[in-house]
Amino acid sequence: MKKLILAFLFTSSFAFAGEVETVGVKGMVCSFCAQGITKKFKEQPEVADVQVSLANKFVKLTYKDGQKLSHDKISTLLKEAGYEVSFSK
């Protein structure tokens, strides 16, 4: 019985996870840049979680179930903050 419950908890935690997208960011040079980008994306209602890698120059967005930001919206948010964007193909 314990194995069944653990298996359910393990699989159900992934069933509700939203889509994940990684976006390259050019021009991000310091921790204040990373903090600003994190704050900007956390303000978006579609975004469940934001992870910014200053070392690797990317933003990893986890969306709420069934929601997503358009590439135009992501580009606008980052360009308005002074950064260049590159999307993975």
Image (cartoon, rainbow, N blue to C red):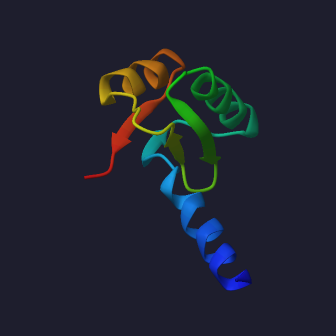
Please state, as top left, top right, bottom left or bottom right, where the N terminus lies in the image: bottom right
How many badges with numbers are in the image?
Answer: 0
The residue nearer to you, when weighing 29 against 69, is 69
Q: At 72% from the left edge and 32% from the top edge, which residue is drawn? A: 35
User: Residue reaching furthest top?
Assistant: 80
Q: Quadrant of residue 28?
A: top right
Name of the residue lying farthest toward the front: 1
User: In the rendering, at what x and y percent does residue 77 appear?
Assistant: 47, 20
Q: Going 25% across and 52% down the picture, which residue do you hit?
A: 89
1 w.r.t. 43: above or below: below
- Looking at the picture, how far across and down is residue 10, in whole percent? 62, 70
- Residue 64 located left or right of residue 13: left
Horizontal and vertical percent position of residue 53: 62, 51
- Which sits in the foreground, 6 or 81? 6
- 67 lies left or right of 48: left
Q: Position of residue 4 (x, y in %)?
A: 63, 79
Residue at 48 percent of width and 40 percent of height: 25
Residue furthest left as drawn:
89
Picture residue at 42% right of the left edge, 47% below the top: 19
